[in-house]
Amino acid sequence: MHRSEGVTRRRIVASGLAAGAALAAGGAVVGRRPDQEGAPGAASAVDRGRLPRVIRPGRQHEWDAHLGRDVAGNRLPPRHQRLLLCALANEPTPERAWQAEAALRRVERAVPLGHHGLLLTVAWGPSWFGRIGVASPVPVAVALHDAELPRLDDPVCVLHLGSDDERLLERVERALFRGGTLLRAGGSSDRSGPTDLCGLLRVTERRTGFVGAGLPERHRAGVVGLPQDQPLPTGTPMFMGFQSGLKRNQATEDDVTIASGRWAGGTTMHVSSIALALDSWYRSLDDRDRVRRMFAADTTPAKVRRSPRGIDHPADVDVAKVADQQSVVGHAQAAAAARRDGRPVILRRDFDSADGGAARVHFVSLSRSIEDFVATRRAMDARPAVGHGAVGVHVNNGITEWMTVEARANLLVPPRRERICPALPGWSG
């Protein structure tokens, strides 16, 4: 385990109490660090200091109650999102963990919870747990198909931020990492202390993007991988022309929450960066062909319109038989093989991007275990169907023909009480 030289328990206690006094002097509304929402936690060497009091769900990934909904009841993701991949800026110590948690709380005091304000998740990779000498609860990412050669990322930490307000999202990122100042509701600045994480983390990569009606078309001009001589489908929320995250095709937050053990109340996260090449998607396929590849071989555009909450696909479908009869296998049809008790096992929070001037999907998947994500991704390959009819590894096989996975990473999303430096000795116990 790594500890800062010369840091003693007495000094840790003193620094925590001094910082708490400074916050109180600055006029902050304060409370003890909660183990769960609104509840006082067991005081360790550091968390006897008083932190800004903020009421938030005990599960970091609990976003759904704070999202908008469409007329069919599907939850609408934040229209603008960012993934900030981070390395350590300094040696992790309980003092720095305390300061980082205080900074996050000051941001949350200044910005309301929800899609009109801010949704924020902090996740930690295997390299973090290795740094502090603790067995990682998630494995390092690997390639998941013989034909893919992704960069295998292992960031110490990833922050996932979402908001319908893109300018607010920029201000929050600037406050967290570039010394900006946030104004609280009503226009007054929070002068209780810094809102930046720079004493602990530094950003090594930014992934930005969007999801929502009209946004893909707004970003289409000059983007590699998209047709430039014709518009995207009217009102489409994503580059491929379909809505992601339909209610019947999503796991619930309860489904993906770790139920017991050391990390109960948390979840696991897989993050991929996927390049899109959609010229032939739009030029070579008509609406019916795109529907068949996205959903199932026997699905029609009319059926999609009649099923605004999504289409149920049986988990026991014989994709080889489908390939023999239809010469195509659908993406959702194949992925359904990974369902548990008839329900999906992953909760997708992906978004499109024009990072680097190219069309991409930044894929974010939450699941009870990384193995659930891997099982779903492997089911997408529809391997039993390959060689049947006209179905190949990529040809007539779902939507992978138009996607290239460029990077993968696995992370743990701890419960909120340990969202900063989980398992760091002297801090979270």
Image: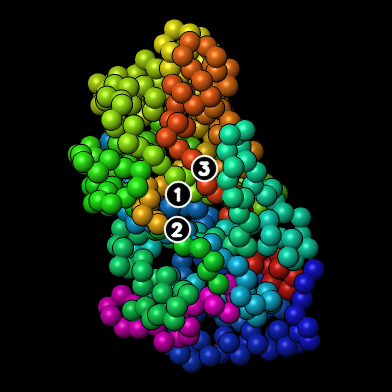
The prevailing secondary structure element of the residues shown in magenta is loop
Range covered by the magenta-colored residues: 184-201
Classify mark 2: residues with Cα within 10 Å, few (<14), some (14-19) or many (20+). Answer: some
Indicate whether 6 appears above or below 376.
below
Which residue is at 52% across, 69% downward? 203
Amino acid at pointer 3: Val
Amino acid at pointer 2: Arg
Q: Are marks 2 and 1 in contact (CB under 8 Å)?
A: yes
Indicate whether 349 appears above or below 3.
above
Residue 215 appears in the figure:
no
Image spot of residue 168 (x, y percent): 32, 68
Which residue is labeled 3 in the image?
405
| In the image: residue 24, left or right of residue 78 | right
Indicate whether 205 appears above or below 291.
below
Mark 2 and mark 1 lie on one chain; the one further toward the N terminus is 2
Q: CA distance from mark 1 to mark 3?
A: 10 Å
Instruction: Answer whether residue 185 is magenta in the image.
Output: yes
Which residue is labeled 2 in the image?
207
Mark 1 and mark 3 lie on one chain; the one further toward the N terminus is 1
Which residue appears farthest toward the top when viewing the image? 325
Classify mark 3: residues with Cα within 10 Å, few (<14), some (14-19) or many (20+). Answer: many
Model colouring: rainbow
Which is closer to the viewer, label 1 or label 3? 3
Which residue is labeled 1 in the image?
362
Indicate whether 177 appears above or below 330.
below
